[in-house]
Amino acid sequence: MSAPAIEVRGLRREFRVRQGMFAPPKQVIAVDDVSFAVPAGSVLGVVGESGCGKSTLARLILGLLEPTAGDVLVDGQRLGGMDRRARARLIQPVFQDPFASLNPKRRIGDIVAMPLIAQGNIGRAEIGRRVAEALDRVGLSRDQGLRFPAQLSGGQRQRVAIARALVLRPRIVVCDEPTSALDVSVQAQILNLLAELRRDLGLTYLFISHNLAVVEHIASEVAVMYLGRIVERTESEALFAAPRHPYTRALLASVLTPEPGLGVPDVGLGDIMPDPANIPTGCRFHPRCPAALTRCSSEVPRTTQDGVGLVECHLVGQAA
Amino acid sequence: MTALLEVRDLRVTIGSTAAVRGTAITVNKGETHCLVGESGCGKSISALSVMGLLPRGSKRETTMLRFAGEEIGKYSERQMERLRGDRMAMIFQEPMTSLNPAYTVGSQMTEVLRRHRGTPRAQAVDRAAELLARVGITAPGLRLGQFPHQLSGGLRQRVMIAMALMCDPELLIADEPTTALDVTVQAQILRLLAGLQKDFGLGILLITHDLGVVARIADRVSVMYAGEVVESAPTASLFAAPEHPYTRGLLTCVPVPGKVKRDEPLGSIPGVVPRITPGFAGCGFRDRCSEAHAACSGTIPRQTVSDGHELLCTLAPGWGGKAAA
Ligand SMILES: Nc1ncnc2c1ncn2[C@@H]1O[C@H](COP(=O)(O)OP(=O)(O)OP(=O)(O)O)[C@@H](O)[C@H]1O
Ligand SMILES: Nc1ncnc2c1ncn2[C@@H]1O[C@H](COP(=O)(O)OP(=O)(O)O)[C@@H](O)[C@H]1O
Ligand code: SF4
Ligand code: SF4
Ligand SMILES: [Mg+2]
Ligand SMILES: [Mg+2]
C-alpha cells in the first residue's frame, strides 16, 4: 500500500488565447512541467498570485481538464482512462463560490444526492441514508436539506458543497479557495470543519488559497506557484520559518497579521505584473525579484531538492 | 487634533433594511480611521452616506454631518458634486466602477482637474504624470495613453488613487481598496496609502473586513456590527484590550501564522449576521453572543472604557477578567 494519494509527473497545460479580435492567438502556459506527490492523509497547500495556475492545477488533478503533457495519478492509478464514476469515488472538489456551484433550482438534499445517483447502482433507501449522514457530518439539519440554495447563508452553502463532496466517501478532496468568499467568522467555522473531517475520515487535501495564514493553519506542506511552476515546496513550519525563494519571502512579507505597530512592510516587488502569455526568459521571476543576479535574466535556475524541500532559484543549492 | 469629518447618529434605511443604525464616526486631519466588520454590516452605506452617493430609495437621517467644520447634511446635490473629487475623494474595491472604459487614463485624470479647477490641459497632464509616478507607476507617460482594460488590477487601483489625489483632497474615503487584489499588491497599495497620508496630511476613512489591514494602517478603529459601531478605540487599545464580545470573537477567528497549532480549532462565532429591519430593538449580536442576558433585549448603553475607547454593550468594561488576546 502507501502509494501517494496524489502524484503528478511533468504536468503541463497550455491554453490558446486571443488578446484582441484580430490579434493572432497566443499560447498561455498555465501549468508548466510540474511534478510532486502528496502522501495519503496530508494536506498540500498551494499558494500564489492570481493567474499563476492554481485552479488549472486543481482541475487537472480532478480530471476536469486534459493535460497537454504529463500524468496525474490518484491513489496510484492513472487518471487518464479512469472511469468517471470510479474517479468520483476517489476524488472530489470543493470550489470557492458555493452559489455558482450549486444548482439554484434543486433542494439541498437532492444536490447532495447527485453524486450517488450518478453512480447508477445505489438504491433509494441507501441514498437517503447517506445524504442524511453527509448533511449531519457538516452540521446541517434535515430541515435545511429541504431548502433551496438561495435560502441558505454563504457558509451554509459551503457546508452543502462539502457534504456533496463527501457523500461518496472519497479519499481525496481538492479545495480551491473554499473560504475566500466567506466572512472571517464563517471562514473559521469552515476551516474547523475541514480539519475535523480530515482527522475523522483520514482524508487527503489539496488546498488552494491566496491567504497564506489560512494555508499555514491547515496545510502540512506548502507549494508556492509562480507563472505555472512550483518555485518552492517545503514542509509548512519550515517554509514559514525560513522561506528560501525570494518570491516566497515576498509573499510571506505581505501577510498582514493583526499586530498593531508593525506598519505595512515593503515587499520590494515593483509594479511589473506577471503575464502568463509572456513568460520572462531565464528565471521567470527575475523582472520582479529584489535579489536578481545578472545571470537570472538568461539562465533558467535548476531545481534543487534537498533535505529541506524543493527550490528553484540561482541563490539556492548551487555553488555561485 | 482637528476633526475633519464628524458624523453623529447616522441612520440609513433602504426599503425594509435598517442598514445603518445610529453610527458616529470622526476622522481627524492626518489620521486613518478604519471601519471594520463583516459583509452587510453597513460599512459601505456609511461611507456612501458621507459622500451623498446612497442608492436610490435610501432614507438618511443624521444629527450631524460636518466636513471641515461645515455642516453638509443639507447640501444640495449640486453642492455635493462640487465637493466630491475635489475636497473629498473616494476609491472603491473595483476600480472599474469609477474608471470609464472608453477613455484613456490620461483624459480621465486630467478631466477631474479641468472640471473642478479649470486647469489648462498641459498643466493637468503634468500633474497626472507626477501623481502616477508618486503612486509607484514606473512608466507614467505610457500609462496615460492606455485604456483601463489594458492595466492589471493593481495598476488600475494605483490609477484610481492617483486620480483621487488630483485635486489635493483633504479626506479620502477608501472602500475595501485592496480586497480584490493579490496580497503582494495589497501590501504595496496600503504602504502607498500610508505614505501619501504622511506626505499630504490626508484624513483617510478606510473600510475593510480584514483585521490585519486595520492593525497595520489604522490610528483609530470602529468595529461595526449589524449597522452599529459596537466598539471604537485607538488601534493599540482595541487590539490590546478588546471589550465587545463580537470584537473579541472576531480576533480569535483570524488565523495568524504560528498562533494556533494545526488541527486545533480556530476560535469561531456560531451563527450568521442577522438581517435587521426598522424597529429592531436591543443588541444586534445577541443571537450569537455567549454572554447574552435579559438586559441585551433592551436599550444598550454606550460606555466609555478609557480615553477614546467606547463600547456599546451591557457588560461592564473589563468583563470576564483579562480581555481575550
Ligand atoms: N479555459 C481557459 N482558457 C484560456 N486560458 C485559461 C483558461 N483557464 C485558465 N487560463 C489561463 O491560465 C492561467 C492560469 O489560470 P488559473 O485559473 O489556473 O489561475 P489561478 O492561479 O487559479 O488564479 P486565481 O487566483 O485568480 O484563481 C491564467 O493566465 C488564465 O487566464
Ligand atoms: N443598493 C442597496 N439596496 C438595498 N439594500 C442595500 C443596498 N446596498 C446595501 N444594502 C443593504 O444595507 C446593509 C449594509 O450594506 P453595506 O453597507 O453594503 O455593507 P458592507 O459594506 O458592510 O458589506 C445590508 O443589509 C445590505 O443588504
Ligand atoms: S533565480 Fe534569480 S531572479 Fe530568480 S528568484 Fe532566484 S535570485 Fe531571483
Ligand atoms: S449587549 Fe449583550 S448580547 Fe450584545 S454583545 Fe453585549 S453582552 Fe452580548
Ligand atoms: Mg483560481
Ligand atoms: Mg461594502
Image (cartoon, helix red, strand yellow):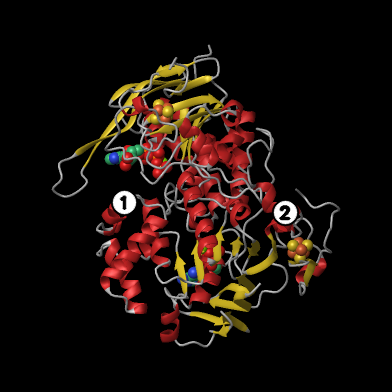
For disc 1, the marked residue is: B139
Q: Is residue A85 above or below residue B133?
A: above
For disc 2, the marked residue is: B248
Q: Position of residue B223 (x, y in %)?
A: 65, 62
Which residue is at a point 71% across and 56% down the rendered structure image? B236
Q: Residue furthest left?
A: A22
User: Which chain does the residue under circle 1 lie in?
Assistant: B
The residue closer to the viewer here, B270 or B164, is B164
Quarter of the figure with the N terminus of chain B: bottom right
Q: Is residue A318 above or below residue A259?
A: above
The residue closer to the viewer here, A143 or A173, is A173
Cα separation between marks 2 and 1: 45 Å
User: Which chain does the residue under circle 2 lie in?
Assistant: B
Q: Are there few (<14), some (14-19), or many (20+) residues within 10 Å of tag 2?
A: some
Q: Specify the amino acid type for callout 2.
A: Arg
Q: Position of residue B84 (x, y in %)?
A: 44, 76
Q: Position of residue A270 (x, y in %)?
A: 41, 44
The residue closer to the viewer here, B323 or B290, is B323
Whether the residue carrying mark 1 lies under 8 Å from ligand 3 is answered with no
Q: Position of residue B171 (x, y in %)?
A: 52, 71
Whether the residue carrying mark 2 lies under 8 Å from ligand 4 is answered with no
Front label number (2 vs 1): 1
Q: Residue furthest right?
A: B321
Q: Earlier in the sequence, mark 2 or mark 1?
A: 1
Q: Secondary structure at mark 2?
A: helix
* Residue A132 appearing in the image: yes
Q: Specify the amino acid type for callout 1.
A: Ala
